[in-house]
Image (spheres, grey):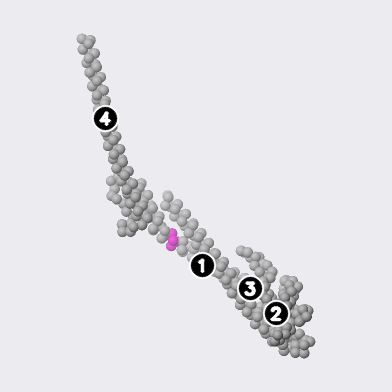
Amino acid sequence: MFTSKLKIYFIINIAFLLLAGMILTDLILININHKAICDLEISRGHLFISFVEEKLKNSSRDGKVLMTDDCKYLLRKITHKTGFSCALFLDKNFGKKYMFGMTDLPETKLFMLAKKAMMSGTSLTSFEGLRKSFFWPQKKYLVISSPLRDGKQILAGISILFPLKKTYQSTIQSQKILFSYILINTFALTFIGVRRFSKITIKPLHRLLKRAEEFDGTDDPFSLYEKDTNEFNNLSVSLNRMLKRISKDKKDLKKTVDALKEANADLKNAQKKIVQMEKLASIGRLS
């Protein structure tokens, strides 16, 4: 009974620890994978911005027209094909010139990010909006803002928006497969771990308990591992010593009990003799 409870306790704990460890590792891998995907999208965004910058240089040589209609059509088409859902263009005076695409993110947010990039003269990357998730809220959009230059001169500013929904969906699909593998691995490793633990721990304990329960004082010395020197072998040696002491104490106790019985019998015989002598003395006085 004791070893069965110990085995069940071990199964529950090792399965929990394995499952928790794999899930924590998976969460770390999710974050690493998400960061890698975002870095890839940021690189694509910068390539897109470089393309827009070159088109802008060619279409605004007179210094008055920010974009030609052909350039706008081409950029709208490329933006759609590359997966960016929205783009906002500012002129060099921070005025909104052109925006295409749709988003639930406030237009003022894109405007402020593009303006900030133009004023700092560097590209900016930010994650905006929130969406519900199984574990914790996640950012909804990736926004890349950058000044558009012609040499050192800033011609305009741009903010492009990439929805992260598809990224999360692909991650969720891969996680479904991964969780299946986690459950299979947890079951397999728990089974292997329990077999190993049972072999080196539970079975020796069961033998020790059985030895202690069946010991009658005439058994030979008992050893779990004849060649090994480990904790269980030391325990079996200690158990043998204890059982030997118990056996010796039982023999000594039996001898003491036998001596007491013999003394008690002698005492009873002496009492009987005394009674008989008193009876004879009484008969002698009467006669």
Quick check: 122 left or right of 206? right
Residue 158 on image: x %, y %: 72, 79
What residue is rendered at 31% in x and 51% in y?
222
Number of numbered labels in the structure image: 4
The first of marks 1 and 4 along the sequence is 1
Mark 1–mark 4 distance (CA, rounded to whole Å): 78 Å
Q: Look at label 3 and name its amino acid.
A: Lys
Position in image of residue 241 (x %, y %): 32, 48
Report the amino acid beneath label 2.
Answer: Gly
The span picked out in magenta is 191-195
Percent of width and height locating residue 87 = 72, 78
> Which numbered mark, 2 or 1, is in the foreground of this view?
2
Depth-wise, is mark 1 or mark 4 nearer the camera? Answer: 4
Q: Which residue is mark 4?
A: 263
Q: Are marks 2 and 1 in contact (CB under 8 Å)?
A: no
- The residue under the point 72% across, 71% down is 105
